[in-house]
Image: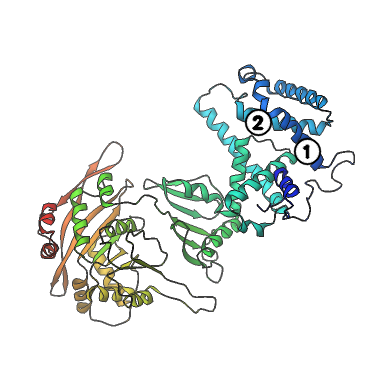
């Protein structure tokens, strides 16, 4: 392992293994001339404290039983520790000065509190515990802010990339322990580990956002400048107490996110879509466009593979509706999933796509790849922004056109938002049945209007009737999903496109959600109701041997 810098264990490894340290020599933690000439150098003082620690740490709980010392005052325990340390030093021909004695008392006292819980108070009501926890967290954050610049002075940041997170954590832990000792910052082992975790998050991860990314209950993270971070849990927004140090700290994290996928965010390109290593979708926008500081919006990647059956169990959809959508997927219907921001369109798209045959070739096209298809034969394409000279941009429309040359069985668009709509409709009309896409709209009829408007964005000057005929022939079904005011996402419409009557696209609803009220917990009540109409794709279902199963769903 290549040592990052000093620290007791790192220094010993350097001496024993002959490996080059990342600093030129072992730098003293105290600047020359900042201590009296009679005071030993920090390295020597640390060595003696280490010897005392090794002699006493293994038998610490036997020497100071928790039951005996639990309710004794801390000064009394510290005095007993000091007496024991001095006796041990005499027995082993060691000489400790006053500073070394205090250091040894501090180290052993922290171990005693952590390992034996000797000084924990008797159980107290919840509010005092909350206050104690808050005080501990404040101490950790204050220690981290003081230690961070000192740590960066004594390590070679360029070497961090050569080590795994575990190796960096091991060496940083040693260095932090040394720095805490020299700065007279008293933290127990748990708090020291928290300081190390915060430092590693800043050095290797996304800083203050790391705990939120690790929290599986959080589905969205919204950063509005360095001092305001919201999260979504169970469909509801909550303000967190997490903060960035300043604007530059936030911008550094944003740049680290987008650089990982070969993109950039700066004053010349202040907007960027990207993704995290786990697949989470990220949007960054920085000043001058973001007035109050950089904004980062993260739609977290769900580790759970949501299926239609799981949605039925959760009350997002009726079991018969789930069965209907499974049949629609197997019958290779062209489906548009419509909904508002954060309504669950991509989750629904993933769930419906699970019914695609494993032998089919699928091409997915997205701005930031986030789809989680389970099939083995999937080609994932992602758009690319222009470079600094304004060249090299690859749009969604470019990728749709290219996908048609890749012999796909199905084309899936993560989101239809512009002129690529015409290319998708043409693909659906030319043998690529079973294609899927999402778009933003509040109702199925509005989804058709938006699709028509996006076709017009291609600048082809087609008459409205021709566009509507293209839509009516290409799209078979619209699934409308909504996040309701209780935070629950529900399928509100399953709507078929039947054909044309004059200049109007005709549709029929197969299932609707009808609101009936709310219960005492605030959760909305309602029924998923079948309209009882015979699906227009019944003959198609018969062709696939699923006609009887389809009628049972109705």
Q: Mark 1 or mark 2, which has the lower sequence index?
A: 1
Residue 263 in percent (x, y) is at: 51, 68
Looking at the picture, does residue 364 appear above or below residue 167? below
Give the secondary structure at mark 2.
helix
Residue at the far top in the pictured view:
68
Instruction: Report the residue marked by disc 1.
Output: 47
**Which residue lies at the image location 61% right of the left edge and 50% below the top edge?**
167
Q: Please state which of the two labelled residues, at mark 1 or mark 2, is closer to the viewer.
A: 1
**Which residue lies at the image location 56% right of the left edge and 34% below the top edge?**
133
Looking at the picture, does residue 477 appear above or below residue 492? below
Residue 390 in percent (x, y) is at: 51, 78
Residue 162 in percent (x, y) is at: 62, 58
Q: Is residue 6 visible?
A: no
Residue 331 in percent (x, y) is at: 18, 63
Counting other residues with Cα less than 10 Å from the Cα at mark 1, is it few (<14), some (14-19), or many (20 or more)?
few
Residue at the far bottom in the pictured view:
461
Instruction: Report the residue marked by disc 2.
Output: 111
Left or right position of 328 against 208: left
């Amino acid at each position: 392992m290549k040592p990052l810098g000093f620290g007791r264990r790192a220094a010993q490894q350097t001496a024993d293994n002959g490996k080059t340290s990342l600093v030129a020599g072992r730098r003293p933690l105290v600047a020359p001339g900042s201590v009296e000439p009679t005071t030993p150098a920090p390295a020597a003082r640390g060595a003696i404290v280490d010897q005392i620690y090794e002699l006493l740490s293994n038998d610490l709980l036997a020497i100071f039983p928790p039951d005996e010392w639990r309710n004794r005052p801390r000064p009394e325990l510290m005095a007993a520790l000091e007496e024991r340390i001095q006796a041990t030093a005499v027995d082993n021909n060691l000489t400790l000065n006053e500073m070394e004695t205090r250091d040894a008392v501090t180290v052993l006292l922290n171990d005693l509190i952590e390992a034996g819980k000797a000084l924990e108070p008797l159980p107290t009501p919840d509010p005092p515990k909350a206050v104690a926890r808050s005080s501990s967290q404040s101490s950790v954050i204050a220690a981290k802010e003081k230690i961070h610049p000192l740590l960066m002075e004594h390590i070679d940041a360029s070497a961090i990339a050569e080590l795994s997170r575990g190796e960096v954590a091991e060496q940083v832990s040693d260095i932090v322990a040394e720095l805490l000792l020299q700065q007279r910052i008293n933290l127990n082992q748990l708090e020291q580990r928290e300081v190390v975790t915060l430092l590693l998050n800043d050095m290797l991860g996304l800083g203050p956002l790391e705990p939120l990314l690790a929290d599986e209950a959080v589905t969205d993270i919204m950063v509005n400048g360095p001092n305001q971070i919201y999260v979504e849990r169970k469909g509801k927004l909550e303000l967190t107490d997490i903060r960035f140090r300043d604007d530059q700290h936030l911008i550094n994290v944003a740049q680290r996110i987008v650089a990982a996928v070969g993109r950039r965010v700066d004053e010349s390109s202040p907007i960027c879509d990207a993704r995290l290593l786990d697949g989470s979708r990220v949007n960054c926008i920085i000043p001058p466009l973001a007035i109050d500081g950089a904004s980062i919006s993260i739609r977290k990647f769900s580790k759970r593979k949501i299926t239609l059956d799981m949605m039925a169990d959760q009350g997002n959809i009726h079991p018969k509706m789930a069965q209907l959508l499974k049949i629609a997927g197997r019958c290779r219907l062209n489906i548009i999933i419509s909904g508002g921001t954060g309504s669950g369109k991509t989750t629904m798209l993933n769930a419906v796509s699970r019914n695609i045959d494993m032998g089919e070739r699928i091409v997915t096209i997205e701005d930031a790849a986030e789809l989680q298809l389970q099939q083995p034969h999937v080609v994932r394409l992602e758009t690319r922004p222009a470079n600094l000279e304004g060249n090299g941009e690859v749009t969604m429309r470019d990728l749709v056109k290219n996908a048609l040359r890749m012999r796909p069985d199905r084309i899936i668009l993560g989101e239809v938002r512009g002129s690529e709509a015409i290319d998708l409709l043409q693909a659906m009309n030319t043998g690529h049945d079973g294609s899927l896409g999402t778009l933003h709209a509040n109702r199925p009829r509005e989804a058709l209007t938006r699709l028509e408007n996006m076709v017009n964005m291609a600048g082809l000057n087609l008459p409205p009737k021709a566009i509507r005929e293209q839509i009516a022939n290409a799209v078979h079904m619209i699934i409308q999903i909504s996040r309701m005011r209780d935070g629950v996402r529900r399928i509100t419409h399953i709507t078929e496109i039947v054909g044309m009557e004059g200049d109007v696209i005709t549709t029929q609803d197969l299932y609707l959600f009808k609101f009936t009220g709310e219960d005492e917990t605030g959760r909305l009540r309602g029924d998923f109701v079948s309209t009882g109409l015979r699906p227009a794709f019944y003959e198609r279902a018969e062709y696939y041997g699923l006609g009887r199963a389809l009628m049972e769903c109705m």
